[in-house]
Image (cartoon, rainbow, N blue to C red):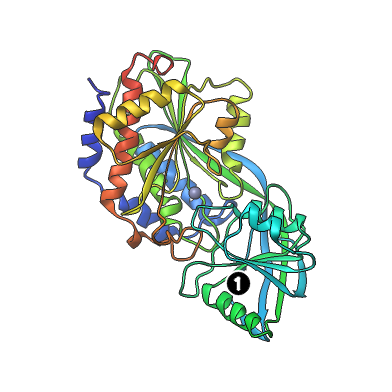
């Protein structure tokens, strides 16, 4: 009875507490919460209390990891200083030189490009196209001496992100605003575009925290479903969409499922730390609890940036044809506006689990018609909607209860 998807869906849609209030607390009262910061610890403490208020057993898992901070970042175009932000793990150095401009970085564009001793200047894509870590790899391979990304969002906005697949990259890499970028390009066209960059950053050891709230199966089932969302952000942005939305979904699901007393499996709800720095929190969790055989995990569900008013919601379902069929059946049954994709959950906390052959269902949302402001100072709550957030939560809540309504997750 309890696990009928319809019941869970209606409980989520009529849940008395606005889901947006969780996001507003994270953005307005706490603010940016990069792993290792005081704000991240404050967030983790808040999450412990939220889990405990839902009668879950809650604890923290701490882990050490490297982080990187820019001590100085400068971008000077024709003797004018423009606001800029260094990408995480940018190379150090002061560089002047000629630019090579690419409006839409792609493998083909790199094959044609002459980057030797030039500064690669490229426009960022909105979630489509080459990821910035692939761009920097191709730029270095082609002999570029620095990388400048022009933000696609007008209004003096700069975007941050991770640039490295491991360790400090060889060349300085930073982002400048749309307007600064176009000022540069106009000057280059006129033959007088002079660009000088400076990045000085340093690595340090910090402690990250995962927050785990558990629902225990009274029959001592040996299986534990993991339900996760990261709570960390970049130091520049309050992270309403990325990933206040996922945290709101996580806490709401934990609260609603905790009201059931007949869940046929253990569930660990996990708010992961240090996702933005290369899913360090989920990796630490996997290492301690799964690689060691402490937990037997038949399914991992993850929510990362899930609720903007418009856009394409995607459920990535990989590693298991059975979960895929099950998800398709369920989504069609309820007519949810969600795409099902069989691509691996790259760049999310689902990825470490996917690498261990654990079935992963990852929900994320994108929009191509306008920016989502993720990884900027303007990722704020008024760009989201309560309805959209509830709908995202209802989809994954219904799906999870659909899985649980079967005899056991192994048999779905
Ligand atoms: Zn995220």
Observer able to see residue 265: yes
Observer able to see residue 54: no
Q: Looking at the picture, tell me which residue is in the foreground, 399 or 334.
A: 334
- Which residue lies at the image location 60% right of the left edge and 20% below the top edge? 293
24 lies above or below 246: below
Secondary element at image label 1: strand
Quadrant of residue 186 within the rendered picture: bottom right
Horizontal side, residue 322 vs residue 319: left or right = left
Residue 412, image x and y in percent?
38, 17
Q: Looking at the picture, tell me which residue is in the foreground, 366 or 123.
A: 123
Horizontal side, residue 68 vs residue 335: left or right = right
Q: Is mark 1 within 8 Å of ligand 1?
A: no
Q: Looking at the picture, tell me which residue is in the foreground, 123 or 290.
A: 123
Residue 29, image x and y in percent?
40, 60
- Which residue lies at the image location 72% right of the left edge and 69% below the top edge? 119
68 lies above or below 412: below
User: Tag 1: Cα neighbours inside 10 Å, few (<14), some, or many (≥20)?
Assistant: many
Number of callouts in the render? Answer: 1
- Which residue lies at the image location 67% right of the left edge and 80% below the top edge? 76
Q: Quadrant of the N terminus?
A: top left
Residue bearing mark 1: 84
Residue 387, image x and y in percent?
25, 49
Residue 251, image x and y in percent?
37, 41
266 lies above or below 31: above
């Amino acid at each position: 009875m309890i696990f009928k998807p319809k019941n869970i869906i209606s409980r989520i849609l009529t849940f008395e507490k606005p889901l947006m209030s969780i996001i507003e607390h994270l953005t307005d009262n706490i603010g940016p919460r990069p792993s290792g910061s005081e704000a991240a610890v404050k967030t983790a403490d808040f999450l412990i209390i939220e889990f405990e208020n839902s009668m879950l057993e809650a604890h923290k898992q701490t882990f050490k990891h490297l982080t990187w901070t820019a001590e100085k970042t400068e971008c000077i175009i024709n003797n004018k200083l423009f606001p800029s932000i260094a990408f995480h793990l940018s190379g150090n150095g002061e560089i002047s030189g000629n630019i090579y401009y690419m409006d839409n970085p792609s493998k083909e564009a790199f094959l044609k490009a002459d980057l030797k001793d030039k500064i690669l200047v490229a426009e960022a894509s909105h979630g489509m196209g080459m990821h910035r870590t692939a761009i920097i790899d191709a730029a270095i391979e082609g002999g570029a001496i620095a990388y400048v990304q022009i933000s696609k969002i007008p209004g003096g906005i700069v975007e941050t992100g991770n640039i490295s697949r491991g360790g400090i990259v060889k060349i300085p890499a930073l982002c400048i605003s749309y307007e600064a970028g176009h000022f540069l390009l106009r000057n280059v066209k006129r033959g007088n575009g002079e660009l000088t960059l400076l990045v000085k950053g340093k690595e340090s050891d910090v402690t990250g925290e995962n927050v785990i709230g558990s629902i225990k199966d009274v029959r001592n089932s040996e299986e534990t479903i993991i339900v996760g969302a990261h709570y960390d952000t970049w130091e520049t942005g309050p992270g309403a969409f990325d990933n206040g939305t996922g945290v709101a979904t996580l806490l709401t699901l934990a609260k609603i499922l905790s009201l059931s007393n007949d869940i046929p499996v253990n569930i660990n709800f996990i708010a992961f730390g240090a996702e933005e720095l290369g899913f360090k929190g989920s990796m630490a969790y996997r290492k301690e609890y799964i690689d060691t055989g402490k937990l037997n995990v038949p399914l991992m569900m993850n929510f990362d940036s899930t609720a903007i008013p418009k856009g394409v919601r995607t459920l990535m379902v990989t590693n298991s044809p059975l979960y895929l069929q099950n998800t398709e059946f369920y989504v069609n049954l309820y007519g949810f506006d969600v795409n099902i994709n069989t691509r691996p959950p790259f760049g999310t906390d689902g990825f470490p689990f996917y690498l261990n052959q654990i079935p992963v269902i990852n929900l994320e949302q994108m929009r191509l018609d306008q920016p989502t402001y993720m990884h900027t100072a303007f990722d704020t709550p008024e760009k989201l909607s309560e309805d959209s957030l509830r709908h995202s939560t209802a989809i994954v809540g219904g799906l999870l209860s659909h899985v649980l309504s079967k005899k056991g997750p192994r048999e779905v």
